[in-house]
Amino acid sequence: MDGVDVFEMQPLEVTRLGTKADPIVVRSFAPLRQVGCTGFPVDSHDTIWLNLTKDKRSRCPECGSVYSMDFQGKETHHH
Ligand SMILES: [Zn+2]
């Protein structure tokens, strides 16, 4: 398939732990993407893939880091 961004399948390198009040914001051009969390500091735990959607935050069950999507794409279900 063309246009697959390999970088989307790399774990994130976070500089802090996301919290409910101040989540890690992940920019995405798709309304759903997977986020690879390795904790903070990076590689604190094995990579855990979280499904992040534009409407819902994701919380890593291992380190508790909270992720939120900054949706950059266009809505496709409108006419
Ligand atoms: Zn984690």
Image (cartoon, helix red, strand yellow):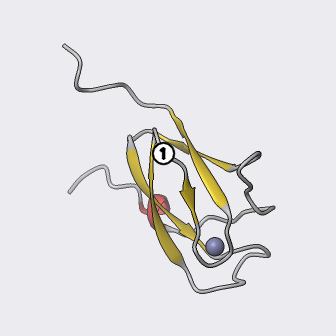
Q: Which residue corresponds to the image point at 55% horizontal and 80% vertical from the top-left?
A: 47
Q: Quadrant of the N terminus?
A: bottom left
Q: Which residue corresponds to the image point at 26% horizontal and 26% vertical from the top-left?
A: 76
Drawn side of residue 4 relative to residue 45, left or right: left
Residue 42, compared with residue 3, is above or below; it is below
Q: Could you say where residue 15 lies in the image, as x and y percent from the top left?
A: 80, 62
Picture quadrant of ligand 1: bottom right
- Crowdedness of circle 1 by 10 Å Cα count: few (<14), some, many (20+)? few
Drawn side of residue 45 relative to residue 76, left or right: right
Q: Could you say where residue 69 lies in the image, as x and y percent from the top left?
A: 54, 43
Q: Quadrant of the C terminus?
A: top left
Q: Quadrant of residue 40?
A: bottom right
Q: Could you say where residue 63 lies in the image, as x and y percent from the top left?
A: 68, 75
Q: Which residue corresponds to the image point at 54% horizontal and 49% vertical from the top-left?
A: 57
Which residue is tagged 1?
56
Query: What amino acid is labelled 1 in the image?
Result: Lys
Between 9 and 67, which is closer to the camera in this rendering?
67
Q: Could you say where residue 78 lies in the image, as x and y percent from the top left?
A: 23, 18
Q: Quadrant of residue 39?
A: bottom right
Q: Check the image and name the residue furthest to the top.
A: 79
Count the numbered circles shown: 1
Drawn side of residue 79 relative to residue 32, left or right: left
